[in-house]
Image (cartoon, rainbow, N blue to C red):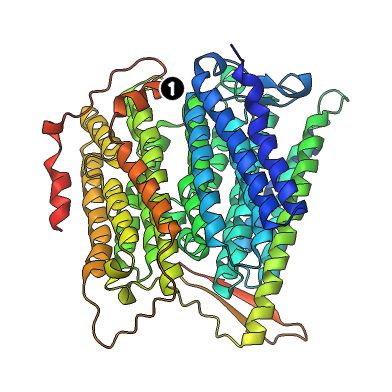
Amino acid sequence: MINALSFLPFLIFVPIIASLLCFWFKHNRSVILISVVCHSLLLVVSVCIFIDQANITQQVYVLASWAPPLGIGLSVNSATVVLVLLTSVLTFFYSVYSFIYFKDNPKQPLFWPIWWFLIAGIFALFASNDAFNVYVALEMIGLSAVALVAFDGSINALKAALRYLFVGLVGSLFYLMGVAILYRTYGTLDFNQLPTLVDANPAATLALLFITSGLILKTAIAPLHFWLPDAHGSAPAPVSAMLSALVVKCSFYLIAVYWLQVLPEHAPKAGYYFLGLLGAVSILWGSWRAFKVERLKHLIAYSTVAQLGYLFLLFPLAVQHTETTALYGSTFTASMYLILAHAFAKSALFLAAGDIIHQYGHDNLSKLSGLVKTSAVSTFTFAIAGASLIGLPPSGGFIAKWLLLSEAIETQMWLLVCVILLGGLMASAYIFKVLNIAFSTPSQHANHQVTHKQSAMAWMALVLACCAIALGFNAQSIMAPLMAPPVVVDLPSVHSMPSVHFMGVFV
Amino acid sequence: MNDILMYSATGFVLFFLGLYFVAFAPLVITRILAINIMGVGIFMFLVAHANSHNGVTDPVPHALILTGIVVAVAGTALALVLVKKIQVLSHNQNVTINSSSDTDQHTIQHTEQSPNQRTKDNLHD
């Protein structure tokens, strides 16, 4: 049997090499060849890691035989094996989509090196096992994401990118300050060693405060979300999808790692509830803004703010549910499921929006009436990906929200129950607002120049939306690997679906 | 011991001073400088401790800071390129730079304060 542990460095080096090669060979054909080879390699590696996870989650891959306190160790846990697989699958889709999206763009050769560098950063973050490596990965992600947001070259994109850059840099500097305090206090930055060095030290709590505030800024949770809609809204469609589906999840994942795995002993209990409160505010405020905005991509971006809020409900539920601090358990499964479902659904929405912009040349909601006639596939994509976002059965979003809801009820956090249900209703409001516009007949004098025909991009978005729905089927087997110590989750049977979700249809 | 405390405290002060100017400085260039000062504050805080082990210097903070400096240079370069592009675009096209998006506004106005055109950046949310 192969030891998949030795594959871990491939996750980081393959995309970096791809980035260098794409920088060197600018011809379209060679870029396609490089991308196909590297994506296949990454897919194979992540599948191997996923299959072999029982073996390798206990071990650390030591780079160049320098043991972790001084050298660099790579490792995966039961969360990151799933996230790594998700990243390989989704980036493969995005890359294919990008080839179609940038087909006639003369700047296309500049796109691929940055794109691959971003992918390398995401993998590096998931495979890192110490606090400083994570900082480097965060900066790789941040800088290349900024460059990709600015790729368009329009003044709005540049301004959004500049603001995104400031936010990203300040966020990572806060993180770095936390890391500095940790290093001074404990003399190590290794994720496996830090939890063993716990003592009642206020410095570690201070470090956690710095780390969390930096990462919250990067995750765009309610009071600090101001940069996200512009950045995600002005980026090219595949980049928006990547940012919303994967990049913001990276910093969320880190917050979860620090609060639940690395420094739980130092985390004040009130902090968990405070994070949950921020999440609840994000759900309500993000959904409300999504309902109000006038541009399709901004709507989808605000919906990301709302959906990220759901992820933050993990913290109060985790601390309420169990006194144990492991990154396992049913609350954790619910969050992982939410990440998966949201990643597919949100990518589908952004990619569909990309096709709509490609056809119309804009994404102004008021001028998109009659959308269903010109781009039926995109509208259909929007409907079914939206169903997953709302949490309508049978979809991945439904399972995730059902799990969250049952956790909230079980722990008797009624406020969270209200917020989760209200968030579902509000999500249906903004999704159906778009569908309502799409199905309405355009007025006579409205000018609807459809410059391009519907393309293969729409179909790709549809495939992703179908994946989001498919996650709702066979949930038990998908979730099994996420439940490292076997915890039985009662999946809802068809007859016990919450009726409140259906009410969303009539809003 | 006193030295270490002094350097660490200075590092903290620099960090928050930088943060203040990132948040409230009117000029984009000032903000970029302020971010660098934040970084310097952290480096100072880290390196202050490196010499405290009975005369044996701890190499790890130096390695961390070296990496941090590289990242800071890359970030600064990217920010400067973006600012320059924004200036060129807004100058050539005579754009009134109130962003037309309906989300939280981010306006950059250029004013003739000096021979060099400066980019002014107001953030409000």
Q: Quadrant of the C terminus of chain A?
A: bottom left
Tag 1, which chain?
A: A
Depth order, front residue of A224/A247: A247
Percent x, y for residue A148? 60, 58
Farthest residue in the top direction?
A: A1
Residue B43: in sight, yes or no? yes
Percent x, y for residue A13? 70, 36
Q: Amino acid at mark 1?
A: Thr
Q: Is residue B85 above or below residue A412?
A: below
Depth order, front residue of B63/A85: A85
Examine the image and state in which quarter residue A28 appears. bottom right
Depth order, front residue of A441/A150: A441
Farthest residue in the right direction?
A: B55
Percent x, y for residue A466? 33, 44
Farthest residue in the front direction?
A: A29
Percent x, y for residue A413? 24, 35
Examine the image and state in which quarter residue B18 appears. bottom right
Total of numbered circles in the picture?
1
Q: Quadrant of the N terminus of chain A?
A: top right
- Identify the residue shown where x is 43% and y is 68%: A357
- Identify the residue shown where x is 62% and y is 31%: A128
- Identify the residue shown where x is 66% and y is 70%: B28
Q: Secondary structure at mark 1?
A: loop
Q: Is residue B83 above or below residue B97?
A: above
Examine the image and state in which quarter residue B3 appears. top right
Q: Which residue is mark 1?
A: A325
Residue A217: in sight, yes or no? no
Depth order, front residue of A461/A228: A461
At label 1, counting other C-alpha atoms closer than 10 Å, the crowd grade (few under 14, some 14-19, many 20 or more) is: some
